[in-house]
Amino acid sequence: MATDTTVQDRLAGTWNFNPVHSSASFAVKYLVAPFRGRFETVEATLADGRLTGKVDARTIVVRDENLAAHLQSPEFFDTEAHPYVEFASRELTIDGDAVTLTGDLTIKGITQPVTATGTIAGPSQHFAGHTALGFELEATIDRTAFGLNWNAPLPKGGGPALSNEVKLIVELEFVQS
């Protein structure tokens, strides 16, 4: 929930989500370099400073079809039983263009608190007459806290193949008419 008059004024009312200018992606270290993926279907709402959203984990996009199927399996997202990754904010603070967003993230039916930081742009007038507002947010989570436990040991005591830390990157646009 928004915490001060400035935030409440800036985010007052209900904003309409614009999926064309929005995305949700992730990055996790695999072996020696980041592995990246995204979700094709993203939904969000912004009403009076409260931000909620979800991605359809069945729409995960990675550069390898076999890996996409593995990520949807019970070893990762278990999309048959848990098709959505969901977020609900508890507090949204703005200092200039800097944003801190705290809330609850649910993956695989497990809910954990998470804090995201980033920036806000707007509200500003869209050339078509609408007022637009945008967020760029990042958070780092421990995937194992959500039951995403698959890993494989590297040979010769090199540690695990997949990092437990996952960076979540969300870019959202909202408009008022």
Image: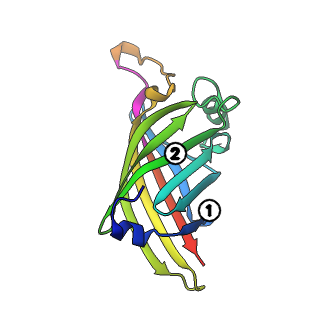
Point out residue 9 in the picture as x, y percentages from the top left corner: 41, 72
Foreground label between 2 and 1: 2
- Of 43 and 65, the residue lying toward us: 43
Looking at the rendering, in which quadrant would you find the C terminus?
bottom right
Magenta stretch? 158-167
Quadrant of the snapshot with the N terminus: bottom left
Q: Amino acid at mark 2?
A: Phe
Along the horizontal axis of the image, is 70 left or right of 165?
Answer: right
Q: Is residue 97 left or right of residue 26?
A: left
Tell me which amino acid carries mark 1: Pro
Q: Is residue 116 above or below residue 64?
A: below
Q: Position of residue 160 (x, y in %)?
A: 40, 21
Q: Quadrant of residue 140?
A: top left
Look at 49% across and 33% down and name the residue there: 111
> Going by the picture, which residue comes out furthest to the left?
95
Name which residue lies at 43% across and 17% down.
153
Q: Residue at x 56, y 51 (%)?
A: 53
| Residue 56 against residue 142 in the figure, above or below | below
Q: Which residue is label 2 attached to?
A: 87
Q: Is residue 151 above or below residue 10?
A: above
Q: Position of residue 174 (x, y in %)?
A: 54, 67
Secondary structure type for disc 1:
helix
Q: Provide the major secondary structure of the magenta segment.
A: strand
Secondary structure under tag 2 reads: strand
Whether 16 is among the magenta residues is: no
